[in-house]
Each structure stands twice: as structure tokens, then as C-alpha cells.
Image (cartoon, rainbow, N blue to C red):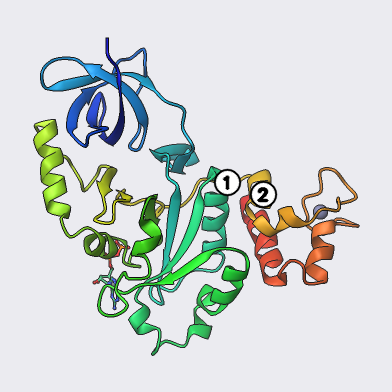
Amino acid sequence: MNSEPARILVSHGNSGVAELGDGTRRRCQYRRSVGRPYCGDRVLAEPADDASLVVTEILPRDNEFLRAGPRGRKQVVAANLSQVCIVLAPAPKPSRDLLERHLVAVESMGSRALIVLNKSEQMATTALSEVGPLRRIDEYRDLGYDVVFTSCKGPPGVAELEPLLERETSILVGQSGVGKSSLVNVLLPDLELQTGELSRVTGKGTHTTTSTVMYTLPCGGRLVDSPGVWEYGLWTLDEGELAAGFREFRAVDEPCRFNDCRHAGEPDCAIARAAGDGRIKPWRYEAYRRLLEQEG
Ligand code: GDP
Ligand code: ZN
């Protein structure tokens, strides 16, 4: 049979919508023997009947985007995201270490983090120094993260963000109220049209209020929208993920005295030494220590 490569745009229990190479969208069914693909999965599919496809293979994933499910278990939201946009705003004020936690999670899933400061039209009136991470924008840039300003209520709009979404598959994450749905609406002027088409293909309403959906941006990139993503918390990060998620720790090339050093005050710790002499920003090291205590 002639299997074709396709991309899963939305996935429900036993079926979903796949997009073929030429852009056409088809309903597709899953087989128990192949498994259930996630939104974003690349698959091989073959015709099942005139209207629908059947998935014959789920291709290897670049990464899986996870969130905390029931009982703290990891739950896959989407696959193959090249970029995770962490959205912050002056209000609701980000809680301490939230951005660090999100950055670690993105590093650990093997994707790229982009920091989006929304409601930026309010930033002239809010003292940035009161809003933890917002006063450290340049330091995040030093660490190699892109930081862009957006507003859904005025300039600069999404002009800084849009070019960074081209050729990427992105998702917006962040606390409830920072403006994720507003950004999705600005970035996707034809949101209703796309939702309508997906519903037409599945033959029933695609429950965009509860489903994770991959949309196509006008610039050609992809945007995954997932309601409630990460708002109820991340999975518990383990110690290995934490240390590896602080990317500048990896640049410290001398070893700690102990192989299993947690960098939590042990004698002769290379990370503590690097924080002491400024190779690691002391506030990042302190955030690491706090996260280690909370997660461990
Ligand atoms: P979400 O919970 O992250 O999806 O946030 P919403 O998109 O629902 O936005 C929460 C509130 O912030 C709404 O009242 C929006 O109108 C408002 N909002 C979103 N973006 C902006 C912005 O750029 N500036 C201002 N002032 N308000 C915004
Ligand atoms: Zn150490």
C-alpha cells in the first residue's frame, strides 16, 4: 500500500486530523498495534476509504512536550515542538523562580525557549524592577535566550514575535492571565476558519476548548494551542533535569569534588565556585538551590 507522510494536527481518542504533504487534511484513524499519535506527530498513513486515512507508523519524535497530569504523572501534550514561548506579563506578576522552572523544563525536553514579555504597553507605567524577571531581560539575553516584547492592546503588537515563529513549530505557555489566548487570536487572524475546517474534516465539532490543536500561521510557521497548558503546574523536575536545565552550568568544565555533587553546598563544588567568581550569575545559582529544595 502507498503510505504517505503526514502530520497530526489534532488527536482525539481513536482518530484525528492529519495534514498531507500537499496541505490537504484528512480524518485519520489509529490502530491499536501502531498506537495513538499526539498533536504534532509525523506519521505514515494510507487510505482507509475514500474520505479517511489510517496511521501505519508513528515516526520518531524530536521531543515530547509534557505537563503534569493526575498524581504528578507526566502527560504528553504535543510532539515535535521546535520552540516553546514562555509568556510573562507585568500582571499577573510572575511568581519567584517560575521563569527558571519553565526554562529548565524546556531545556530538559530538548526544545528552544523564547521569552515573550506581553502587555508591554503597560511596562512604561509599571516599575519593571518590581517584576522579578522583567528587570533581568539583558541577563537572559546574555544566557542566550531571545526576549521579545508584545502587546495585544497596542504597539508593538506581535511585530517582534512573528518573525521568530516562521519555520518553527511553537507553543505558548505561561500563567493564566498573561495573555496567551489573546496572543493566539492576534497571531491567527483566521483562527475560526481553521477551526471550522478541522471540524468539517472530523465530521464533528473539534473541541478546541479542550483539545490541543496545531494551527498554521500566516508566516508559514505552526502554532500549537493547548488550553490550560502548564497552568496547573509542571511535572516534578528531578535533580538531573534541574542541573542540566541551567544551561550555563554545562559550560563549567572543571569537575566538582564529588561525582554525584548536587551543587547544594558540598565542599569543593565547581558550580558554587563559578557562581562565586561570576562565571555563573549568582541569582541563577540561588534560584537553582531554591528549586532543588522545592523539587527534591
Ligand atoms: P491567558 O489566560 O494567558 O490566555 O490570558 P488571556 O488572553 O485570557 O488574557 C487575560 C487578560 O489580559 C484579558 O483581560 C486580556 O484582555 C488581557 N490582555 C491580554 N494581552 C494584553 C496586553 O497585551 N495588554 C493588556 N493591557 N492586556 C492584555
Ligand atoms: Zn557541585
- Dot 2 amino acid type: Ala
User: At x 54% / y 57%, what residue is drawn?
Assistant: 103
Q: Which mark is residue 82?
A: none
Q: Is residue 6 visible?
A: yes
Residue 103 placement, left or right of 46: right
Residue 36 placement, left or right of 88: left
Q: Nearer the viewer, residue 191 or 163?
A: 163
Q: Position of residue 145 (x, y in %)?
A: 55, 63
Q: Position of residue 36 (x, y in %)?
A: 34, 24
Q: Nearer the viewer, residue 215 or 266?
A: 215
Please tell me in which quadrant of the rendered image residue 144 appears: bottom right
Mark 2 neighbour class, 10 Å CA radius: few under 14, some 14 to 19, many 20 or more: some
- The residue at which mark 2 appears reads as 244
- The number of callouts visible is 2
Q: Nearer the viewer, residue 20 or 291?
A: 20
Residue 137 placement, left or right of 239: left
Mark 1 neighbour class, 10 Å CA radius: few under 14, some 14 to 19, many 20 or more: many
User: At x 16% / y 22%, what residue is drawn?
Assistant: 52
Ligand 1, what quadrant?
bottom left
- The residue at which mark 1 appears reads as 108
Q: Is residue 205 visible?
A: no
Image: 293 above or below 42: below
- Dot 1 amino acid type: Ser
Q: Position of residue 9 (x, y in %)?
A: 27, 38
| First reached walking from the N terminus: tag 2 or tag 1 | 1
How far is mark 2 from mark 1, CA to CA? 7 Å
User: At x 13% / y 52%, what residue is drawn?
Assistant: 192
Residue 26 placement, left or right of 281: left
User: Label 1's element?
Assistant: helix
User: At x 23% / y 30%, what residue is drawn?
Assistant: 16
Q: Quadrant of the N terminus?
A: top left
